[in-house]
Image (spheres, rainbow, N blue to C red):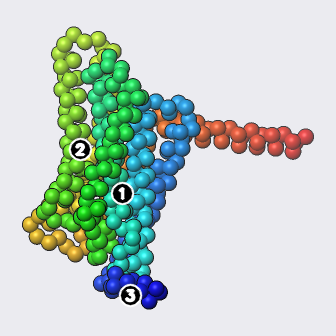
Amino acid sequence: MNSIGVIKSVANSSTLNFQSWFIPLDIFTIICNMLTVGFAIFFLLIILIDKTCHTVLMMLTANSYLSQLIFASDLVGGAVFSLHNDLKQIQYQDSLCSFRGYFGYSAYGVMNYSFLLQAFYRYVIVVYPRHLFLQSSRFQFLLICITWIIAFMYPIRFLFTGQIIYNADNQICQVRVQLSFPMIFMTLFIYIIPVSLIMLIYFKVIQYIKEMRKRVTPAIAVIRAQRELKMFQRIIILITILVVLGVPYAIFIFMSFFTDPPKYHLRIACSAIYISLLCVIITSYEFTEPLKASIQKIRNGRLNRTTAIVTYVNVNQRN
């Protein structure tokens, strides 16, 4: 039995054409994604604990943080696997490689659609302020559940039909980067469709506000719509970060339709995605005022307790 296992291990592994920059890039990947995981867990705990964060908008924000947590955790697992193989200078596919690719596609899709849900919620507040059901927590939670179910269902076909494969040069499992139905479908579903819908909703909101200014509309309604538009613009900034830093990956995908991309293209392209994920979660925190206020309260509470303890100690020393 042991000899059979050794034979299988040797058959599934081979020597890697090692490059000196592999290890630093693997370590950089682990650090970036671990920071994202840490921030996401911390923000989710704050939202869960602080009752002032128990609003529909913060529920949608927590949905984004949860998807980023799962995506970053999946990327950490992939980076550790890559570092292990690079250190040993081998090409070897472990049993979880294809599942990491599946979870990566699913979590990335949930993350992009979570921003779409936030955009839709802002749109409803501006255009349909009297439709309270559309703004309710139950309806928005239903939309969240639907996006999660769809995002984790659509890649299953590619997982069990062997479309998610091991790329030995880049130490990653994903759909083969070439002109094919799986590649086009993945790109459309998790990237082009949600980003396009967010931009469409954004322009619809701008058009609606312009029409409000032309009509005799109460000033309060216009001010509220402008405030929501400002919040909407922050979502656009987050999407822009993902789009801009996702350009290298998009270029390599487009290149693969006509010719073979560079040998280590995924290592280069994915590093930009890791940076974008970290930038998005930090920028999202800067844009989320209720979360910032909750963290400030915690800091002030600790500061007050520390001040009280120091004062108490000083008084006792004087006495």
Q: Quadrant of residue 30?
A: bottom left
Residue at the (33%, 30%) spot, across then down: 121
Q: Secondary structure at mark 3?
A: helix
Q: Is residue 253 visible?
A: yes
Answer yes or no: do the residues labelled 2 and 3 have beta carbons within 8 Å? no
Residue that mark 3 sits on: 7
Identify the amino acid type marked 3.
Ile
User: Looking at this rendering, what residue extends furthest in the left direction?
Assistant: 258
Of the two numbered discs 2 and 1 in the rendering, the one whose residue sits closer to the viewer: 1
Q: Amino acid at mark 2?
A: Val
Front: mark 2 or 3 = 3
Q: Earlier in the sequence, mark 1 or mark 3?
A: 3
Please report the residue visible at 29 percent of the width from the left and 32 percent of the height from the top: 120
Mark 1 to mark 3 CA distance (whole Å)? 30 Å
Is residue 220 or residue 187 the one in the foreground?
A: 187
For label 1, the residue is 103
Q: Nearer the viewer, residue 19 or 2?
A: 2
Q: From what the image shows, is residue 306 above or below residue 172?
A: above
Q: Residue furthest front?
A: 1
Which residue type does callout 1 highlight?
Answer: Phe
Q: Locate residue 69, reporting x and y percent.
A: 43, 52
Which residue is disc 2 drawn over?
Answer: 195
Residues at badges 1 and 3 in contact (C-beta under 8 Å)? no
- Give the Cα distance between marks 2 and 3: 47 Å
In the image, taking residue 39 as reference, residue 168 lies left or right, namely left
Determine whether 245 is above or below 310 in the image.
below
Asked if marks 2 and 1 touch (Cβ < 8 Å), the reply is: no
Instruction: Please tell me whether mark 1 sits on a helix, a strand or a loop.
Output: helix
Residue 220 picture quarter: top left
Q: Earlier in the sequence, mark 2 or mark 1?
A: 1
